[in-house]
Amino acid sequence: MNLFTEIRGTVIAALEAMMDADTLPAGLDLSNVAVEPPRDPLHGDMATNAAMVLAKPAGLKPRDIAEDLAARLADDPRIASAEVAGPGFLNLRLAPGQWHDVLRAVLAAGPDFGRSTMGQGRKVNVEYVSANPTGPLHVGHTRGAVFGDALASLLDFTGHEVTREYYINDGGAQVDVLARSVYLRYLEAHGQEVAFEDGTYPGDYLIPVGEALKSEVGDAYVGQPEEVWLEKVREFATEKMMGLIREDLKSLGVEMDEFYSEKSLYGTGRIEAALAELESKGLIYEGVLEPPKGKKPEDWEPREQTLFKSTEHGDDVDRPVKKSDGAWTYFAPDIAYHYDKVSRGFDALIDVFGADHGGYVKRMKAAVSALSDGRVPLDIKLCQLVKLYKNGEPFKMSKRAGTFVTLRDVVDMVGADVTRFHMLTRKNDAPLDFDFDKVVEQSKDNPVFYVQYANARVSSVLRKAAEAGIAADDATLAKADLSILSHEAELTLARKIAEWPRLVEIAGRTNEPHRVAFYLYDLASDLHALWNRGHDEPGLRFLQEGDAATSQAKIALARAATVVISAGLGILGVTPVEEMR
C-alpha cells in the first residue's frame, strides 16, 4: 500500500475530470504531477505541485487551477481538507482513518510492506568491491562492499532481478608482484633470510600463504629461476588471496553471485571480439592524441595508437585501447568485460568504484553506450574515502596488512551490523568519518544505536504484553480499534510509517541506499518522541493497565514501526536487535 501513489491517482483523476469539463485544456501531460510530503509538516500531510507544473502548458494562472482542483479533492472522503497556498501549491490533510489503514496494511504484509514491482523484473548487474587479489580487503573496500550490497538488496526489494558480481583483477602486473612476494615467504618458510624490496607486498598475511606453498610443493621451487615457478605461484597465490577475500566479505555479510576473472579475457578472443564490435560501428581508428592538459611540448611524444572514438558517446576525448607497441591498454579488457555483461542480457549495469576512479566514468559509460547502442544504461557510483578515528585520534595502520587497516580489523572491533549501518550514514560520494568509539556509543547521536534501540523498546513492550496476557500477534493487532489513535504524536509516527513505500521507490530509482538509513533514523526519532511523551502523558503509553483494547491499538502502532524498521535494516544487511546490552 503506497498511500502517496493512491492520493496521486486521486489527483490525476480530478485533473482528468477538469479536462473533460473544459476547465483545463485536453491532452495535458500529467507525468510531472507529484504528491509528496510537504517541507513543513504544519502545512499538511501531503502537497501536490499539479497547478504549478500545468499552469504554463494550460495557459492559466496556477492559483486558478489549484482552487478548482482543491474543490474537487475536498469531495473525496479520504481527504479532510485541500488548501491552496502561495502562488498555487495545494496542501492536503487526510482523514485519520487513512493512517489507520496504513497500519493495518503494514501488519498484514509484514516485512513485504513497501516491497515494489517498480523494477518489473529488469535484470541488473551490480559490480562492487572488485579489489586486486593481492591482499586482504581494506577499509575503503569495506565502504564499497557495504554500499554495493545494500544497493543490490534495495533493487531486489523494488522488483529487479539482481546479480551481485565481483571482477577479479588478476590479469595485470600486480599479480606477478604478488607471486614474487609469496615466493619470498615460501623461501622464508624454508628458513632463508629474505628482503622485501620496494614494489613487493611485505604484509604478514602472506606468511601462511608461503607456508601453504611449501606444504604443496616442498622444496621444488627453492633456488629455481622465476620462469620455472612464476606462473604456478601466481595461480596458487591468487586462489589463496581470493579465499581470504571471500572470508572477509562473509564476515561482513556479503556474498557474491558471480566472480569474473579478468585473466579469462586474455588469449580467448574476448577483447578482440569487443573491439571488433566497436569497429563495426566505425568507432575504432588509428590516430594520435593531443597532449594531456598540463604537459609541455617537450614532455610529449606523439605516437600513433588504436583509439576508441568515445567522444561520439559523451566522452571528453577519444581513448586508446592498444598501445603503439601492440599491447592492450588497461581500458581494453574493461571494454571486453562490459561487452560480456551486455551480451549476458542485463537491462542495466551498475559499477561501484573507489573515488580514485573518477576519471574512468565517462569513458566507461561511452563504451557501454556504444556496445549496447544506447540500450543498456551504466550508472557508476563512486565511494569516497573513509577516515578512521579512535578516541578522536586518527587510527593507525594494521600490522597484519603492513600498510592499511583491513576490513576484518573493522568488523572484529565493532561488528558487522554496526559497520554496515554506519557506512551508509553518508551518501556514497561524501567523505565518511568512522570513529570506533562513537559508532558503538549509546546515544541519539549514534544512528546505529538509535534505530536499534527503537526496535528493542518495542520488543520489550511485546514481552510485557505477553506477560500481562494481552494478545499482540500481528493478526490480532490488525483487527484492533485503531480509531483510538488520535493524538498528534501518534499520527506523526503513523505518517512517517506511511512514507516507507514512497521512500523505497525513490531510493531504488536513484540507486541511493543511504536514503534508507536516513529514513530509519527519522522513523526511530518519531517513535522515541512518542515513547518519551508517555513519561509525562500516561495516556500515550503503549501499555494501558487494565485496558487491553486500547493497549492493542497503541501496540499496533509501535509494532508497525518495527516491521518497517526490520525491513529497512534488512535492505541494509543489518540484523535488528530485540534487547540492548
Image (cartoon, grey):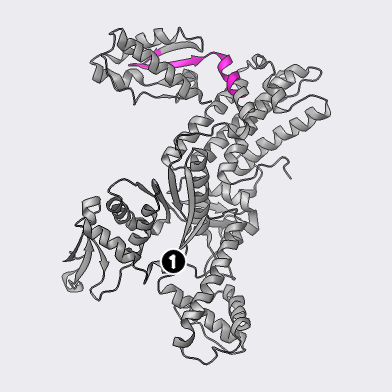
Q: Residues within 10 Å of mark 1 (few under 14, many from 20)?
A: some
Q: Position of residue 266 (x, y in %)?
A: 37, 70
Q: Is residue 529 visible?
A: no
Please say whether residue 90 is one of the residues in the magenta stretch: yes
Q: Position of residue 144 (x, y in %)?
A: 49, 54
Please say whether residue 80 is one of the residues in the magenta stretch: no
Q: Position of residue 338 (x, y in %)?
A: 36, 57
Residue 512 located left or right of residue 534:
left
**Looking at the image, residue 528 lies above or below residue 397:** above
Give the magenta part as a residue range. 84-103
Number of numbered tags placed on the structure image: 1
Q: Secondary structure at mark 1?
A: loop
Q: Position of residue 314 (x, y in %)?
A: 25, 50
Q: Quadrant of residue 464?
A: top right
Instruction: Residue under label 1, please give it.
Output: 169
Residue 68 located left or right of residue 323:
right
Residue shown at 44% from the left, 69% from the top: 170
Q: Quadrant of residue 476?
A: top right
| Image quadrant where one finds the C terminus | top right
Residue shown at 40% from the left, 10% from the top: 70
Is 457 or 102 nearer to us in this picture? 102
Residue 323 located left or right of residue 7:
left
Is 346 or 243 nearer to us in this picture? 346
Residue occupying the far bottom of the picture: 223
Q: Is residue 246 visible?
A: yes
Is 410 or 309 nearer to us in this picture? 309
**Looking at the image, residue 326 lies above or below residue 92:** below
Residue 448 located left or right of residue 376:
right
Mark 1: amino acid: Asn
